[in-house]
């Protein structure tokens, strides 16, 4: 698990909502936190996303939250490129960013029904490379944070949608989620949609009829490992967040 990007730093795009979003949302389709450890290298971007553009200034982010900037893979000018985007989709027609937190995730089952998403399905699909993500498991009235990673140790390629908003001059993205697998259901009822490197070109370039077949619960092995609930506060951003609870 490892990360990189061209001159984009893993820093918050905005802090104005931080106070209200320190803890994972109670009814979120999936908890709004990902992580990109120092092990996610430029070589992983090259190998998994076929990115060839140069990069520098790599900085890990152990607690990626909504409004943080991420390098997002899209198809542009005949190749896969990285573009810095804010997490939390703002539709192209929106006049302000007040709804961006409601659009950190997009449910796969209703993509073709929601105006904010259905117009993006044909040509605004994207992929986000991360080391893994965080999820909270309810235990009575309390919740326990888990880091979720591929069992084979490879980074995750998350399927998403992106949009340019000319009024607000922002480029934003959302992560598509599916129903959880039976194995993951005890942790949470949703999972981010994940694709493999050999599916990337079809996801970015194929017709929606072809691409939609890839938006399925992830079939590979993943591990959910209990970690400190300190990750619930976006101000905490250090490698110890990934340490398993003893």
Image: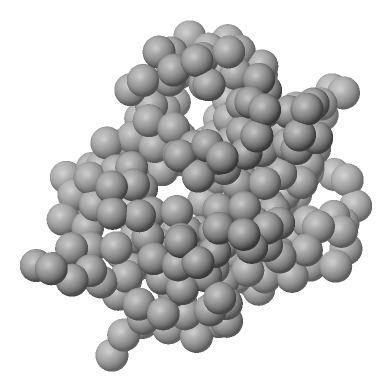
Question: Which residue in the rendered view is the most extreme toward the left?
Answer: 140
Q: In this view, does 207 lie to the left or right of 147?
A: right
Instruction: Give the position of the N terminus as an image quadrant.
Output: bottom right
Question: Which residue in the rendered view is the most extreme toward the bottom?
Answer: 246
Q: How is the image coloured?
A: one colour
Q: Where residue 129 sits in the image (x, y, percent)?
A: 61, 50
Compared to 24, does 174 lie above or below? above
| Residue at left offset 45%, top offset 67% | 22
| Residue at left offset 50%, top offset 85% | 240
Q: Quadrant of residue 65?
A: bottom right
Q: In which quarter of the image is residue 2?
A: bottom right
Residue 177 visible in the picture = yes
Q: Where residue 192 sits in the image (x, y, percent)?
A: 41, 43
Q: Is residue 56 left or right of residue 69?
A: right
Q: Where residue 200 sits in the image (x, y, percent)?
A: 61, 32
| Residue at left offset 37%, top offset 60% | 24
Q: Nearer the viewer, residue 25 or 216?
A: 25
Q: Where residue 27 sits in the image (x, y, percent)?
A: 28, 47
């Amino acid at each position: 698990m490892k990360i990189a990007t061209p001159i984009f730093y893993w820093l918050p795009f905005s802090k104005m909502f931080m106070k209200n979003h320190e803890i994972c949302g109670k009814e979120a389709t999936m908890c709004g936190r990902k992580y990109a450890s120092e092990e996610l290298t430029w070589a992983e971007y090259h190998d998994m996303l076929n990115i060839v553009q140069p990069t520098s200034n790599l900085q890990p982010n152990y607690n990626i939250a909504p409004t943080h900037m991420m390098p997002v893979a899209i198809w542009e000018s005949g190749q896969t490129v990285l573009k810095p985007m804010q997490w939390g989709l703002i539709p192209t027609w929106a006049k302000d960013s007040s709804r961006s937190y409601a659009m950190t995730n997009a449910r796969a089952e209703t993509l073709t029904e929601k105006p904010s998403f259905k117009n993006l399905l044909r040509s605004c699909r994207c992929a986000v490379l991360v080391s893994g993500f965080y999820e909270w498991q309810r235990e009575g009235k309390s919740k326990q944070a888990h880091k979720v990673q591929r069992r084979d140790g490879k980074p995750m390629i998350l399927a998403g949608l992106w949009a340019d908003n000319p009024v607000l001059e922002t480029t934003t993205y959302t992560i598509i989620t599916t129903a959880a697998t039976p194995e993951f259901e005890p942790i949470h009822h949703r999972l981010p949609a994940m694709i493999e490197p050999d599916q990337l070109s079809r996801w970015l370039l194929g017709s929606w009829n072809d691409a939609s077949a890839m938006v399925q619960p992830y079939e590979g092995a993943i591990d959910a490992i209990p970690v400190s609930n300190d990750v619930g506060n976006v101000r905490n951003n250090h490698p110890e967040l990934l340490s398993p609870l003893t």
